[in-house]
Amino acid sequence: MTSQQPASRRTVLRGAALAGVAGLGAVACDGKGKGSAVPTAPVDLGSSGEVPVGGARLFREQKLVVSQAAKGEYRAFSAVCTHAGCVVDKVENGQISCPCHGSRFDAATGKVLQGPAGEPLPSVPVRVTGGKLIAGPES
């Protein structure tokens, strides 16, 4: 008969910590948040001047990306990747990047530039009211 020794406190805590980290990754990229970044009510994003002409800006807290192709021509997209539901983390050189699996999207159109995402980022209505960007449906 073989006797087993109980696990040390360190072993138990290490296992719990690793399970917790793995769980955080699953929550961040579980896909349950897909589409949750498409506002159902108007969202004030602040000054329209915060989005450069010919560029784009990530509004991470609101899970939106807004681009301005030409002066006064704004487009907005969900910042939730269509592959696994992760929130994108940066906009550079006209591309929106997802940190989870490497998908890239065109900041001007939301179209997929590099997979694994197969669907473009959902478009979100955006307008300028009183010098402020307002995303989502009209109230």
Image (cartoon, rainbow, N blue to C red):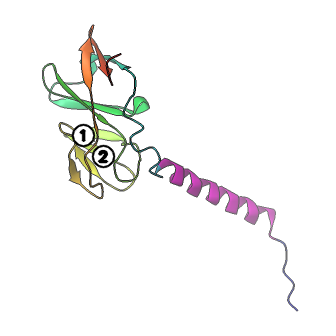
Screen quadrant of the C terminus? top left
User: According to the image, label 2 marks what residue?
Assistant: 97
Q: Position of residue 48 (x, y in %)?
A: 26, 17
Label 2 environment density (alpha carbons within 10 Å; few <14, some 14–19, many ≥20): many
Q: How many marks?
A: 2
Question: In the image, what residue occupies the spot 34% across and 49% down?
Answer: 82
Tell me which label, 2 or 1, sits earlier in the chain.
1
Question: In the image, what residue occupies the spot 30% across and 58% down?
Answer: 116
Screen quadrant of the N terminus? bottom right
Q: Residue furthest front?
A: 139
Residues at discs 2 and 1 in contact (Cβ within 8 Å): yes
Disc 2 marks a residue whose amino acid type is Ser
User: According to the image, label 1 marks what residue?
Assistant: 92
Mark in front: 2 vs 1: 2
Question: Residue 110, which numbered label?
Answer: none
Q: Nearer the viewer, residue 39 or 5?
A: 39
Q: Position of residue 38 (x, y in %)?
A: 36, 33
Question: In the image, what residue occupies the spot 41% across and 47% down?
Answer: 86
In-image side of 117 versus 100 (left or right): left
Residue 5 lies within the magenta run: no
Q: Residue furthest left?
A: 70
Label 1 environment density (alpha carbons within 10 Å; few <14, some 14–19, many ≥20): few
Q: Main secondary structure of the magenta part?
A: helix
Question: In the image, what residue occupies the spot 32% across and 54% down?
Answer: 102
Image vertical order of residue 11 relative to residue 46, above or below: below
Q: Examine the image and state in which quarter residue 2 appears.
A: bottom right
Whole-angstrom CA distance, mark 2 to mark 1, is 8 Å
Which residues are drawn in magenta? Answer: 7-28
Disc 1 marks a residue whose amino acid type is Glu
